[in-house]
Amino acid sequence: MLVAFWPLASNAARGPGLDDRGFENAQDAFVAVFIDSGLGRRAYEENREYAAALYQMPDGRWHATPVSTGDLKSCRIPYDKVPDGAVRIAGAHTHGQPRIAGEGKQEFGTGFSTIDRRNALLSYRVTHGRVESQWLLTSHLQILELSFAMAYSPADSRIGVQSRIRDLGLSERFARHSADTGPLATSR
Ligand SMILES: [Zn+2]
């Protein structure tokens, strides 16, 4: 798969909050990189995936790696761009539009795919929990967080990895951004 890095130094991709001070939490970093920058909207229009890794440094602040460009159905999350000193990491990516020409009425990208979940769990396991969550801008332009934690399962009386998905809905900031620049074609 061809992987290129989006030039974050350009004005188009560098949002106003995307500076060296970082962000209070992973969600703020995600919104800055994918929503406030306009990248999520462009990803939707281009119908391709973009990805970045978000990471927390020991001072508690969250940052983002440069964004990588994918294709219609996949994008490599650039974990290799995360500094060694990062203490927590989150993968983040976007999905394209929910309809694919010739695929009838079926919708795509409305949530974490089977491959997304498999890769997320693998990343959690091989990094011993350092990659603890995943953020997704779905093809319906909603924000989801998939997180992992070790927890006791009464069902099989064992401590194991449990996952949880949090639906943050359509970002208010995204809605405002969209209103500024015209409606998106999301009449479903
Ligand atoms: Zn995905």
Image (cartoon, grey):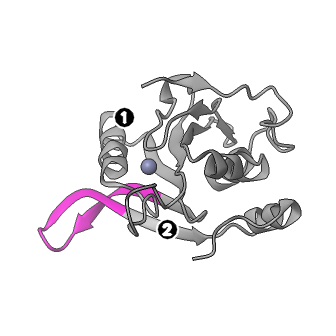
Helix, strand or loop for disc 1: loop
Q: Which residue is mark 2?
A: 166
User: Where is the C terminus found, in terms of image quarters?
Assistant: bottom right
| Sequence-wise first label, 1 or 2 | 1
**Mark 1: amino acid:** Thr
Picture quarter containing residue 4?
Answer: top right
Q: Residue furthest left?
A: 156
Q: Residue at x 73, y 25 (%)?
A: 7
Estimate the x, y position of residue 41 in percent, counting from the top left: 70, 52
- The segment highlighted magenta reads 146-163
Camera-nearest residue between 11 and 88: 11
Estimate the x, y position of residue 34 in percent, counting from the top left: 68, 48
Estimate the x, y position of residue 70 in percent, counting from the top left: 52, 35
Estimate the x, y position of residue 141 in percent, counting from the top left: 61, 63
Q: Which residue is mark 1?
A: 127
Is 107 placed left or right of 26 in the picture?
left
Ligand 1 neighbours mark 2 (CB distance < 8 Å): no
**Mark 2: amino acid:** Arg
Q: Residue at x 29, y 47 (%)?
A: 118
Q: Give the crowd class for mark 2: few <14, some 14-19, many >=20 residues within 10 Å.
A: few
Q: Residue at x 63, y 31 (%)?
A: 65
Is 23 placed left or right of 128 in the picture?
right
**Residue 83 appears anywhere in the view:** no
Ligand 1 neighbours mark 1 (CB distance < 8 Å): no
Picture quarter containing residue 119?
Answer: top left
Q: Residue furthest bottom?
A: 188
Residue 162 painted magenta: yes
Label 1 – label 2 distance at C-alpha:
22 Å
Picture quarter containing residue 109?
Answer: bottom left
